[in-house]
Image (cartoon, grey):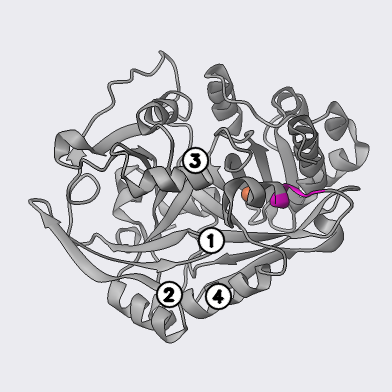
Amino acid sequence: MTTDSTHTLTPEERAADLDVDQLKQLVGLVEYDESKDPFPVTAMDAVVFVVGNATQAAHFYQSAMGMELVAYSGPETGNRDHKSFVLRSGSARFVLKGGVSPDSPLVDHHREHGDGVVDLALEVPDVDACVSHARAQGATILDEPYEVSDEYGTVRMAAIATYGVTRHTLVDRSRYSGPYLPGYAERASSYRKREGSPKRLFQAVDHCVGNVELGKMDYWVDWYRKVMGFVNMAEFVGDDIATEYSALMSKVVANGNHRVKFPLNEPAIAKKKSQIDEYLEFYGSPGCQHIALATNDILRTVDAMRAEGVDFLDTPDAYYDDPELRSRIGQVRAPIEELKKRGVLVDRDEDGYLLQIFTKPIGDRPTVFFELIERHGSLGFGKGNFKALFESIEREQERRGNL
Ligand SMILES: [Fe+2]
């Protein structure tokens, strides 16, 4: 396929040696007419976490998640408030922040919410146009457009509020060549990968899920449509994602090119407490529930992460032995036995299939976790797996005493 890839790819994607065809497969990238979009979004710029100990978290993201440290800000660079580590894997960028000064607002944030995502930063070509559209649609502007500069150039940014205490920082880095943002110093990993470990464990962020309160899902779906010009992709209600005990509803919005996909969940009334209720209680507000990471070799990625001690939700053997599942999923690239050994789930729809697996919560609170996803044509989110997945989550909730 000979799309004008210099135009279609972001600098991060080019730097990660990704091409348009790979991205179509990895994250379901589609072409669209940006000129008609009132709020054009190019890609995710970064997923920004506040954590209790960024120094140690940075080690985890390198050792267990295979990411590479690229930039740093902290007391040594003149930032006395907090430490901030920037890590990359393919086109995905994570930023980990932890308070240094006891007076840092990040310390208060962490006291209230625990480890979590504070910012789903978006790369946009025109910060000012986005902000004026968002304002006209009633969005809360947290930071008016501003510029920061250093010897690498200038970045133009702004920020708008989304659900809970989460924000979307809008970033135009087209005039900037530094490692992240002005104020950050380039920094390489001192961590050495084990011999034979894959170059990277994931290539891109596929989707970021938001958990909102009961009755608020449609509000936020409309908000993304009105404020950010996102389109509806899929929805799951009622029986789709109910087990005997707990239930939730979910709708998915995406930007024009589908690089950025935000499923939005709300709890549904059921016999017992749903995973969304548990999240809302322990995070203390609506927030980001999971980040799905696109990989082109989920088996190898799971093996590498397991070897570093990452815990995944387990899938009962019955899932793989179910003849209905076997006939529904048909032929996939790996033998079912290999998937079963690792607990990797399969789902098929009219466009193809996907393989996916979920980690247990990565922090102390039962809140944020990761998904690994390997797409083969399917643009879905694993609807056929929701029941098996939620039953697995319920077993974990039960162990925590939160069901
Ligand atoms: Fe997901």
Label 4 crowd (10 A; few <14 / some 14-19 / many >=20):
some
Label 3 crowd (10 A; few <14 / some 14-19 / many >=20):
many
**Amino acid type of the residue tagged 3 in the rendering:** Asp
N-terminal-most mark, 2 or 4? 2
- The residue wearing badge 3 is 115
The span shown in magenta is 273-277
Q: Is 341 situated above or below 268? A: above
Residue under the image location 22 percent in, 51 percent down: 181
Q: Residue 140: give its label.
A: 2
Q: Secondary structure at mark 2?
A: loop
Q: Residue 121: give its label.
A: none
Figure quadrant of residue 341 = top right
Label 1 crowd (10 A; few <14 / some 14-19 / many >=20):
some
N-terminal-most mark, 1 or 2? 2
**Amino acid type of the residue tagged 4 in the rendering:** Trp
Q: Is 202 situated above or below 180? A: above
| Residue 298 falls left or right of residue 73 | right
Residue under the image location 22 percent in, 68 percent down: 146
Queried whether the magenta region covers residue 274, the answer comes back as yes
Q: CA distance from mark 3 to mark 1?
A: 15 Å
Q: Residue 164: give its label.
A: 1
